[in-house]
Image: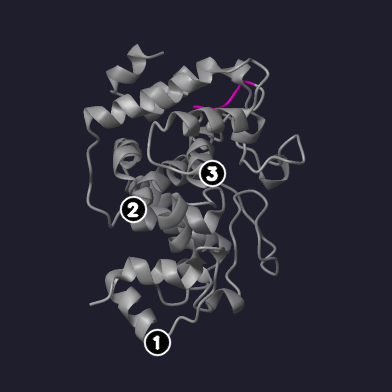
Amino acid sequence: MQDGKKLLFDSFWSSSGWSYNEITDEVFQTCIEQGYMFDPPEIITHDEYMKKLAEVVKNIDPKDVADAFLYSLSTRALEYRSALGSYWYAAAVPEHEWPDDKTYHCPVCGWHKWSDNDRKRHRGYNVLNFERYKWGGVRHTKGHYALFDLEQFLLLPKVKPTDEDIKLFAEILDCAAQMNPDKKVGELQKIITSKKIIKSNKSEMQILLDILGICGILSSPENPCYADRFVDTYGRDPVEYKNDYAYPTNRWRASDGINTDRLNIVFQGYDVLKDKQ
C-alpha cells in the first residue's frame, strides 16, 4: 500500500514549493484510510465551534502537549510539536459571542466559517494537516486550525521525551542569552539554526519560535501571551512591516529574555530546564 503521508506531501509540495497536484480518487481514499486526508469539513456555527473547542481543551492534559513538543525535538515528528501552540491558544480563548452569522470570520478567536470552496480536496482539513506535518502547523491562532489540531492530537499515541530532548530544549533557550538586547526573534532563529541544535530548517524553526511565543515563553509584560492577556486578531500584527512571525513572538526582543514564569507553567516538572535559567 502507498504511504499516505507521502501522498499528502506530494499533493501540496514539490522541490520548488507549493504544488497543487491533482488529488485523484485513489490517492484521496488511501489518505483517508490512513488518516492523512479527510472528507469536507462540517459547517458549524460559531457557538457550536466554541463548545467543541472547550470540550477538546478539557480532554487534554497540558503535560501531554509539553511532552509531545519536547519529543518532537529529536524525532522531528512535527505533528507532535504543533499541539503546544494550539492548546495554549485554545485554552486562553475567552467566552464570547459572534452574532453576525453572515460573516465568515470572528475577530476575537479567529473562528472561520467553512465555505463551499473550503470543501474542495486541496482545502479544508487536508491543507491544515499538510501544514501540521510539514512545519508543525502554521495557523495555531486560527480557531479552525486549533480545534482540528487538538482533535488530531487526541488520536496520537502519547509520548515521553528523553533526557536528550530536554537538553536540546535547554540549548535552544540558552541562545536567547547570546543576543544583543536590541535584537529580534529573526536573529534568534539564525543563531539556533546555525548551531544545528536540532534537525530543522528556517520555516520549521520560525514555527517553533511562534509556538514558544503563543504559550508565553517568548513574551514580555508589554506584549504578553494569550493566557496573560488575550489579544484579538486586530492587535496581533507585528510592529515592523517585514516580520513574518506571529504574536507575541513578532514583538519579542532579546532584552525581554525568556519568560521563566511561563516556562515553569508550560513545562512544569522539568527540573533540568529550571537549572538552565
Q: Position of residue 266 (x, y in %)?
A: 39, 30
Tell me the mark number nearer the camera, choosing from 1 and 3.
1
The residue tagged 1 is 25
Of the residues shown, which amino acid type is indicated by label 3? Val
Separation of marks 2 and 3 at Cα, in angstroms? 19 Å
Separation of marks 2 and 1 at Cα, in angstroms? 26 Å
Q: Position of residue 202 (x, y in %)?
A: 52, 43
Can residue 50 be seen here? The reply is no
The residue tagged 3 is 93
The magenta segment: 217-221
Tell me the mark number nearer the camera, choosing from 2 and 3.
2
Q: Position of residue 16 (x, y in %)?
A: 56, 63
Q: Which of 193 and 44 is in front in this view?
A: 193
Q: Earlier in the sequence, mark 2 or mark 1?
A: 1
Of the residues shown, which amino acid type is indicated by label 2? Phe
Q: In which quarter of the image is residue 244?
A: top right
Of the residues shown, which amino acid type is indicated by label 1? Asp
